[in-house]
Image (tube, helix red, strand yellow):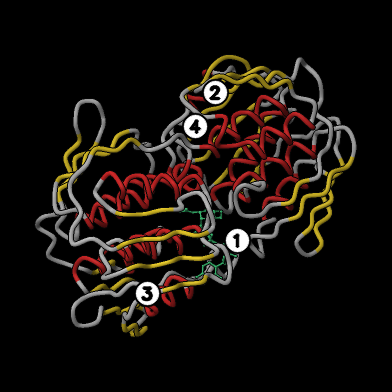
């Protein structure tokens, strides 16, 4: 199994290009199942999760061609299977995103029920309840969600989501675009990736109002057409490189991104003492060689501070001046990185959903283990500041969400390399 070997202590500097957003690309790829024409999707990141989604579409009969400009052409006109098998779903929970499109377009879907994962139990009950409200009949048999639309197809419905759910909102939205009549989704997720999906569906001919607010109104249409769409920049990748600059006292410009996507994160970085400058499609963070100041962070659905940046800010506080409190309100078990960081000398006390982090002047290199995607990114950040060498094991988590992470960090002056091994 590959690992990343990092020798810390270099102050990061320079420019880095931000990739397309994984969490936007995944639902957009799933949405191509709704199209009666050919779709062309640009700015897809090169990541394992994207390959898995393309593989999943492929096993249903979808034809995928990669163009010279790295955009992907997707032809869903010959779909012959509506099954998402266990072997693919178990490697990527976001496979559940094919449920809504399959049910809306073909009236049937069989999707392996995703299990729990490292950050919590993560049920999909709200996805299923939304489809049931549209008239679907759903059973869970042999570990599979078996869903069937009523005679004549899904029907528009009023759906209130008890909890704000990103993929749940996306799945129900994709089911609603071809349903008969009007669907209203209340307490919908407002994440930029939900808005990006809605914009892609609108480009295909869907009628959707309210994207970016907590109420989505969808008028069902007869069919959706082929369209061209470019995935928005990855705000979490952007934030991760900015924090890397912050913790190493460096100066990094992230390019091909959008400052409007991460206002809550930029606000916290300024509070931590960073000098932030922005343009239409870039963000520069200059720490001017200083240590960051500890900040208090509370995760919550967009536009509040994103849970996917929580682990990176635990590291920022771990090397900051002062003590910061980090409260996680989205997932019940998302502090797995804390114990690994303690092994590198961090002072972190976790109680329930709160981590109290007291900054240390330095961390020390150690062998550590990645447990989930963002936790692994935080271990890389800690390793970049630590004295000595750190091996980050189980980096397949990182490869799911960060394109060319070692090349991008090398470009910024980090001493990092991939080591193959058992
Ligand atoms: C998405 C993101 C993930 C991010 C998360 C929160 C993708 C592919 N992944 O995950 O990176 O960390 O949003 O911003 O976009 N819940 C239920 N019932 C449901 C659905 C969710 O109780 O049916 C709960 C979850 O357990 C969790 C909370 O709702 O506590 C939010 O989860 P959700 O927004 O659904 O996360 P994902 O969409 O899986």
- Left or right, residue 335 beside residue 113: right
Are the residues at dot 3 and dot 2 in contact (C-beta closer than 8 Å)? no
Disc with the residue nearer the chain's start (1 vs 2): 1
Q: Is 401 positioned to the left or the right of 389 in the image?
A: left
Q: Are marks 1 and 4 in contact (CB under 8 Å)?
A: no
Is the residue at mark 1 in contact range of ligand 1, meaning its CB lies under 8 Å from it? Answer: yes
For mark 2, does the 10 Å Cα neighbourhood hold few (<14), some (14 to 19), or many (20 or more) residues?
many
Residue found 39% across the figure and 65% down from its top? 172
Q: Can you tell which quarter of the image residue 220 is in?
A: bottom left
Q: Position of residue 389 (x, y in %)?
A: 67, 31
Residue that mark 1 sits on: 119
Which of disc 4 and disc 2 is earlier in sequence?
2
331 above or below 52? Answer: below
Mark 1–mark 4 Cα distance, whole angstroms, equals: 22 Å
- Where in the figure is residue 416, as x and y percent of width and height? 56, 27
Task: Tell which tag, 2 or 4, sits nearer the viewer.
Answer: 2
Queried on whether the Cβ of the residue with tag 2 lies below 8 angstroms from ligand 1, the answer reads no
Who comes first in sequence, dot 1 or dot 4?
A: 1
User: Mark 2 — residue?
Assistant: 254
- How far from the left and from the top, in percent, is residue 55? 25, 53
């Amino acid at each position: 199994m590959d690992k990343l070997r990092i020798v810390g202590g270099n102050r990061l500097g320079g420019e880095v290009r931000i990739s397309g957003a994984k969490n936007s690309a995944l639902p957009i790829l799933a949405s191509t199942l709704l199209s009666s024409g050919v779709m062309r999707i640009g700015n897809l990141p090169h990541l394992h999760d994207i390959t898995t989604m393309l593989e999943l579409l492929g096993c249903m009969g979808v034809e995928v061609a990669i163009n010279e400009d790295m955009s992907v052409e997707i032809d869903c006109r010959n779909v012959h299977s509506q099954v998402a098998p266990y072997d693919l779903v178990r490697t990527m929970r976001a496979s559940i995103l094919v449920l809504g499109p399959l049910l809306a377009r073909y009236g049937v879907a069989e999707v392996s029920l995703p299990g729990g994962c490292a950050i919590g139990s993560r049920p999909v009950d709200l996805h299923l309840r939304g489809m049931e409200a549209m008239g679907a009949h759903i059973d869970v048999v042999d570990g599979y969600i078996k869903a069937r639309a009523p005679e004549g197809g899904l029907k528009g419905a009023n759906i209130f989501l008890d909890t704000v759910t990103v993929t749940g909102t996306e799945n129900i939205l994709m089911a609603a675009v071809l349903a008969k009549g009007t669907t209203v989704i209340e307490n919908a997720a407002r994440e930029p990736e939900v808005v990006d999906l809605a914009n892609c569906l609108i480009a295909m001919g869907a009628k959707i109002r309210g994207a970016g607010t907590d109420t989505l109104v969808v008028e069902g249409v007869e069919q959706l057409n082929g369209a061209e769409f470019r995935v928005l920049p990855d705000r979490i990748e952007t934030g991760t490189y900015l924090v890397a600059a912050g913790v190493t006292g460096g100066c990094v410009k992230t390019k091909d991104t959008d400052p409007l996507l991460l206002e809550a994160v930029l606000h916290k970085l300024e509070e931590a003492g960073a000098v932030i400058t922005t343009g239409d499609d870039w963000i520069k963070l200059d720490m001017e060689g200083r240590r960051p100041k500890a900040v208090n962070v509370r995760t919550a659905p967009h536009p509040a501070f994103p849970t996917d940046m929580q682990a990176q800010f635990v590291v920022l506080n771990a090397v900051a001046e002062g003590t910061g409190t980090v409260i996680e309100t989205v997932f019940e078990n998302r502090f797995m990185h804390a114990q690994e960081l303690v092994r590198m000398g961090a002072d972190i006390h976790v109680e329930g959903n709160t981590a109290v982090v007291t900054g240390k002047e330095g961390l020390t290199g150690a062998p550590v283990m990645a447990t989930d995607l963002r936790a692994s990114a935080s271990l890389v950040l800690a390793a970049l500041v630590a004295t000595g060498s750190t091996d980050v094991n189980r980096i397949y988590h990182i490869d799911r969400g960060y394109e060319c992470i070692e090349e991008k960090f090398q470009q910024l002056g980090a001493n990092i390399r991939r080591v193959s091994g058992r």
